[in-house]
Image: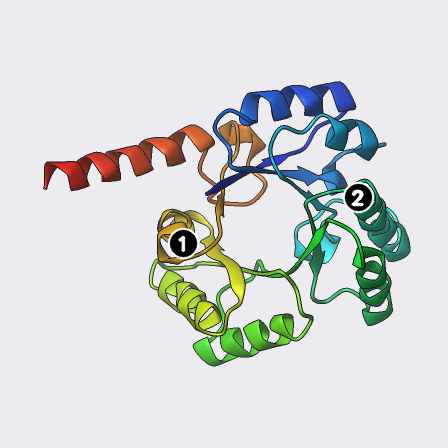
Amino acid sequence: MICVPIASTGADEALEKMRRASPLADIIELRVDRMPDVDLQKLLAARCKPVIVTNRRREEGGGFAGTEEQRVELLKEAVRLGADYVDIEAATDPGLKKGLRETLVGSRSQLIVSWHDFSGTPSAEFLRAKLSACMAESPAIVKIVTLASVTADCLRLLDLIPCARQQGQAIIAFCMGRPGMISRIMAPMLGSLFSYASLEPKEASAPGQLTLRQMKEIYRSMEEGQDDD
């Protein structure tokens, strides 16, 4: 499955991007950290595909300018408005995470606990420890993303997918950066719930992110190649 991140300077622009993405995307991510004065009620009411609401912290590539309390409060609002998923970083203050989990009780929303490393891809041992730490938060989905310096880094990161699945944990895992592009393609084939792709090259939410059209064309070519065999 492919998730398309949406960011914008206004509600009307965001709605237009959601409309364009919906026919091809499997799920949409609203990057509210890149949406000043976001109207979550309006955006969630207009969805035609499942929606993840993400308010990424600055330390992990986000753009939210407020306090941590304000950042998490927007995620709570998303839960109250019926977002399908909310994404919170594992490094968030434990008290704030607890408050979000309490808001989730009895709601339709599910929790994604994420961890991003923009400096590189750590050792296999470190990555497995990070997976265990994220799983300890009891999320519906764990998301672990690192920066690949060389293509071989992707192997360590992608190895988390079967590791998580063997423990019954749904996971999203891939590498950023140009050397990590192959991992974005391979991740869903290995069991990652989905990968991320932008509507246009200039709208990429992370380095090395392919466009939705590119991802679809690659998967189509791969399917045609299998048919030829």
Can you identify the residue that label 2 sits on?
78
Of the numbered discs 2 and 1, the one sitting upstream in the chain is: 2
Q: Give the spatial CA distance, label 2 vs label 1.
A: 27 Å
**Amino acid beneath label 2:** Ala
Count residues near mark 1 (Cα–Cα under 10 Å), then give few for <14, some for 14-19, many for 20+.
many
User: What residue sits 51% from the left and 73% below the top?
Assistant: 127
Q: Is 75 placed above or below 41 here?
A: below
User: What residue sits 81% from the left and 59% below the top?
Assistant: 105
In this view, which residue lies farthest toward the front?
Answer: 106
Disc 2 element: helix
Where residue 74 sits in the image (x, y, percent)?
A: 84, 46
Where residue 26 sits in the image (x, y, percent)?
A: 51, 37
**Amino acid beneath label 1:** Ala
User: What residue sits 62% from the left and 23% below the top?
Assistant: 17
Question: On the image, which quarter does residue 31 sit in?
Answer: top right
Pair 2/1: label in front: 2
Q: 25 left or right of 16?
A: left
Mark carried by residue 187: 1
Q: Can residue 215 be seen in this view?
A: yes
Q: Is 130 placed above or below 27 here?
A: below
Disc 1 element: helix
Q: 142 left or right of 163?
A: right
Where residue 206 sits in the image (x, y, percent)?
A: 56, 45
